[in-house]
Image (cartoon, rainbow, N blue to C red):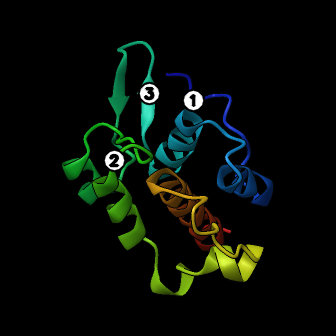
Amino acid sequence: MMMSNLPPLNTETIWAIINEQIDDAIVNQIVWHYLGYRYDSTTNQWDNSGVAPDWQTEYPEPPDFIANRPPTVKLTRSIPPENKQLLKEQLGFKGYKIGEFGPRQTRRATAANWLLSYMKINS
């Protein structure tokens, strides 16, 4: 559960998430990192002291956003309304073509959008 080799949070990384050039496990780790989850290798446990209380309560350990719908829905709801269309507005992402995508791609796009929103809020 190493989180030290994460790619930088920039538009190249966001595109790589959308274009499935980054592994699902790494996508999860990037989101976990910016949500505030930290893995303590000395105790082999997750430290969620930097995580927002509503996430701490529901997910004491970081959830798998790509495999499961509920945490992704929560992620979507945590994006401010004005940032919900950032993939389209900032990156010009037109969405996946019908027949080319399933739940996995949708969840990856949600993660990408959340990270873009995080970048905008924290820039």
- Image coordinates for residue 95, horizontal then vertical, percent: 64, 71
- According to the picture, the residue beneath numbered tag 1 turns out to be 3
Going by the numbered disc 1, the residue's amino acid type is Met
Residue located 42% across and 12% down the image: 42
As drawn, 96 above or below 62: below
- According to the picture, the residue beneath numbered tag 3 turns out to be 39
Mark-to-mark CA distance, 2 and 3: 21 Å
- Residue furthest right in the image: 12
- Image coordinates for residue 37, horizontal then vertical, percent: 42, 40
Q: Report whether 63 appears left or right of 66.
A: left
Q: Secondary structure at mark 1?
A: loop
Q: Nearer the viewer, residue 108 or 9?
A: 108
Going by the numbered disc 3, the residue's amino acid type is Tyr
Image quadrant in which the C terminus is located: bottom right
N-term mark: 2 or 3: 3
Q: Secondary structure at mark 2?
A: loop
N-term mark: 3 or 1: 1
Disc 1 crowd, CA 10 A, few/some/many (<14, 14-19, 20+) = few
Q: Nearer the viewer, mark 2 or mark 3?
A: 2
Going by the numbered disc 2, the residue's amino acid type is Asn
Mark-to-mark CA distance, 3 and 1: 8 Å
